[in-house]
Image (cartoon, rainbow, N blue to C red):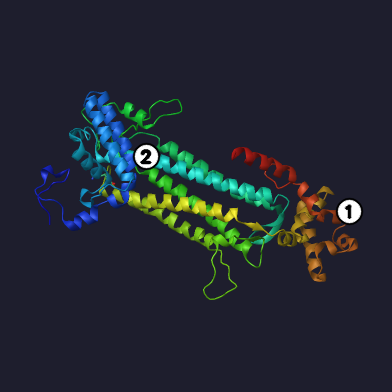
């Protein structure tokens, strides 16, 4: 049990918190990573205080110099973090107080409530930029894999059953679309983060003559034309955790995408498919079975997605029942956000590494895509062009497939007499449908896997990711 209160907020207390309470309530063990943002926020805030005359230029300079030294200590690992000072804000403020008398004025017109909201908005802008850059790198790797295997065809699947032939690159470009949407989503979250909370105070601003726009500008909370953006309701400012949820949702969706990509890779690298060989560097062996090479990086990508969804769920549950405005519960908003950031960053890097070492096995792809049944739909289209209604054509080709199955031959090995027996509209040229390259060349609408479209998409992605 504690000595009379020495803590920053201790004026109205006769005793400090219990040791157990300190352990329970501290957040410095995880929020210390906000130090660079906290220091930036304090520098901007003190610059504003000097700008409006609440502190002198000399005091501002002393505060800035002190904060710079503290940040240097933190970055060099020399800073001593104290649990009893609860959080990153009070650790830094106390350290500053030891160096600079003017530190006692730093918290003028500020609360930890608008301070943490500011730190986190700066963190989100940084985190979104970092993840955006990592996604871009992974996308570039993916584009390179597509480029190196431009001519490879594979079956596309629905219901995990062979459906229609596509270029492997078309499948990889589907992944690219997913990752690119993720990248854009982080840009949107960053744009939502771009409003300055400082000045909202604890809940109702301040009576002191501050200049919120000045602070916002100093911290880079500005629109495209450099105009300051400040939050518009002081209560919402300290209660709002939408960004946390949006960020965690964006990460969870990355997780879902990586998990689906990973699942494709796991299937494709199995002996049953063997369309690809995964790099040794991202696989592991079995401690018992000498022949095993397991796709662990992909399995972990699939597994981590659960964790990212869990973090999102934690944040939704954390906020749903809270009365306005700030409640201490909200301190629990940071571990899931940091975990989502760290794990998403790792996952995207691991996907990039796995893809960079991927080897495509063209012979296996060719064998799988040679299945003429993949072109059954094309055969129905052939009949449509001969004037047959699609439903009738579909039915006729179904009968052809059944006949081939009965004769135990591939569909294009039936005789012309056989197929004409099914439908009179089949001509002598019916087998031309089964020329794969010719079949692909007919799929030239936007978004389809025809060779001209593929060239267009290669050009589009090269430009986009340049
Ligand atoms: N460590 C606190 C948090 O993360 C900072 C805000 C504290 N505010 C307060 N009124 N106790 O939520």
Mark 1 is surrounded, within 10 Å at the Cα level, by few (under 14), some (14 to 19) or many (20 or more) other residues, namely: few
Q: Up-down: is 375 above or below 43? A: below
Q: Secondary structure at mark 2?
A: helix
Quadrant of the displayed image that contains ligand 1: top left
User: In the displayed structure, does residue 334 sit left or right of residue 55?
Assistant: right
Q: Up-down: is 286 above or below 111? A: below
Q: Is residue 375 visible?
A: yes
User: In the displayed structure, does residue 437 sit left or right of residue 342?
Assistant: right
Question: Going 34% across and 47% down the picture, which residue do you hit?
Answer: 33
| Residue in the foreground of this view, choosing between 307 and 6 | 6
Mark 2 is surrounded, within 10 Å at the Cα level, by few (under 14), some (14 to 19) or many (20 or more) other residues, namely: many
Image label count: 2
Q: Up-down: is 343 above or below 185? A: below
Expressed as whole percent of the image width and height from the top left, the position of residue 251 reads 46, 49
- Residue identified by numbered label 2: 121
- Residue identified by numbered label 1: 429
Question: Going 64% across and 39% down the picture, which residue do you hit?
Answer: 460
């Amino acid at each position: 049990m504690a000595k009379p209160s020495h803590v920053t907020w201790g004026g109205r207390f006769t005793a400090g918190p219990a040791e157990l309470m300190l352990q329970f309530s501290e957040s410095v063990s995880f929020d210390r990573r906000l130090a660079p943002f906290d220091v930036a926020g304090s520098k901007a805030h003190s610059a504003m205080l000097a700008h409006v005359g609440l502190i002198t230029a000399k005091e501002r300079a002393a505060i800035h110099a002190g904060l710079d030294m503290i940040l240097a200590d933190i970055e060099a690992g020399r800073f001593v973090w104290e649990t009893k000072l609860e959080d990153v804000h009070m650790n830094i403020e106390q350290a500053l107080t030891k160096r600079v008398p003017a530190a006692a004025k730093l918290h003028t017109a500020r609360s930890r409530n608008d301070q943490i909201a500011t730190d986190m908005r700066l963190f989100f802008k940084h985190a979104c930029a970092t993840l955006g850059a990592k996604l871009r790198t992974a996308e570039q790797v993916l584009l390179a894999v597509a480029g190196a295997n431009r001519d490879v065809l594979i079956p596309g699947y629905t219901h995990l059953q062979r459906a229609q032939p596509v270029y492997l690159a078309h499948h990889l470009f589907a992944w690219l679309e997913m990752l690119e949407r993720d990248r854009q989503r982080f840009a949107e979250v960053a744009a939502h983060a771009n409003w300055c909370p400082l000045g909202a105070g604890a809940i109702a601003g301040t009576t002191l003559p501050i200049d919120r726009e000045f602070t916002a500008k100093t911290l880079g909370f500005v629109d495209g034309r450099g105009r300051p953006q400040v939050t518009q309701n002081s209560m919402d400012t300290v209660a709002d955790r939408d960004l946390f949820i949006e960020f965690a949702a964006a990460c969870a969706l990355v997780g879902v995408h990586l998990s689906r990509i990973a699942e494709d890779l796991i299937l494709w690298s199995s002996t049953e498919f063997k369309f690809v060989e995964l790099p040794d560097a991202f696989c592991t062996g079995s401690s018992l079975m000498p022949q095993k090479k397991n796709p662990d990086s992909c399995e972990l990508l699939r597994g981590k997605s659960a964790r990212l969804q869990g973090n999102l769920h934690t944040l939704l549950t954390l906020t749903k029942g809270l009365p306005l405005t700030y409640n201490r519960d909200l301190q629990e908003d940071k571990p899931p956000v940091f975990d989502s950031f760290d794990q998403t960053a790792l996952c995207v890097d691991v996907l990039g590494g796995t893809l960079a070492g991927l080897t495509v096995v063209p012979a296996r792809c060719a064998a799988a895509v040679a299945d003429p049944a993949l072109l059954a739909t094309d055969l129905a289209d052939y009949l449509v062009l001969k004037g047959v209604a699609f439903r009738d054509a579909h039915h006729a080709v179904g009968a052809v497939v059944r006949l081939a199955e009965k004769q135990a031959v591939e569909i294009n090995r039936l005789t012309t007499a056989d197929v004409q027996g099914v439908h009179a509209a089949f001509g002598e040229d019916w087998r031309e449908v089964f020329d794969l390259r010719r079949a692909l060349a007919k799929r030239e609408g936007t978004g389809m896997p025809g060779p001209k479209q593929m060239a267009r998409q290669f050009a589009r992605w090269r430009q986009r990711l340049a």
